[in-house]
Image (tube, grey):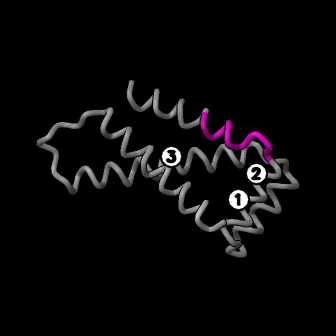
Amino acid sequence: MQNQNVDKGLDLQMFVNRLMEEKKFPESLKPDALEQIKADLLSRVEDRINALIINNLSEENLDIFNKMLDEKGNDTEIQAFCEKCIPDLAQLIATELTVFRQTYLS
């Protein structure tokens, strides 16, 4: 199951890489600047996904979720909890990523 979390992290990296390719930054941009843009984009995508999760949890489940985070819970357990509490989580994330992409590229 840990590999699944790694895969999801890689999926977000791939999403960000594709966004940057589609944005077509000038070739004159320095590699350090591109890496900073990439890190910023990844952070923004993760923030959007986290907000989506928080907004779709009931108050009771949000309390449990926060407790899991405070206790430095296992990523696999946290992911399973979110998927159990938000049955359409994968679809919601896909929609959020689509909206983010459209906004970023426009």
Disc 2: which residue: 83
Q: Are marks 2 and 1 in contact (CB under 8 Å)?
A: yes
Which residue is found at the position 68% from the left and 36% from the top? 91
Disc 3: which residue: 45
Amino acid at pointer 3? Val
Q: Quadrant of the N terminus?
A: bottom right
Percent position of residue 57, x then y:
79, 48
Percent position of residue 81, x then y:
78, 58
Against 100, residue 34 (above or below) is below
Residue farthest toward the top in the current orientation of the protein: 106
Residue farthest toward the bottom in the current orientation of the protein: 71
Q: Earlier in the sequence, mark 3 or mark 1?
A: 3
Q: Earlier in the sequence, mark 3 or mark 2?
A: 3
Distance (Cα) linking label 2 and label 1? 6 Å
Residue farthest toward the right in the current orientation of the protein: 60
Magenta residues (range): 86-94
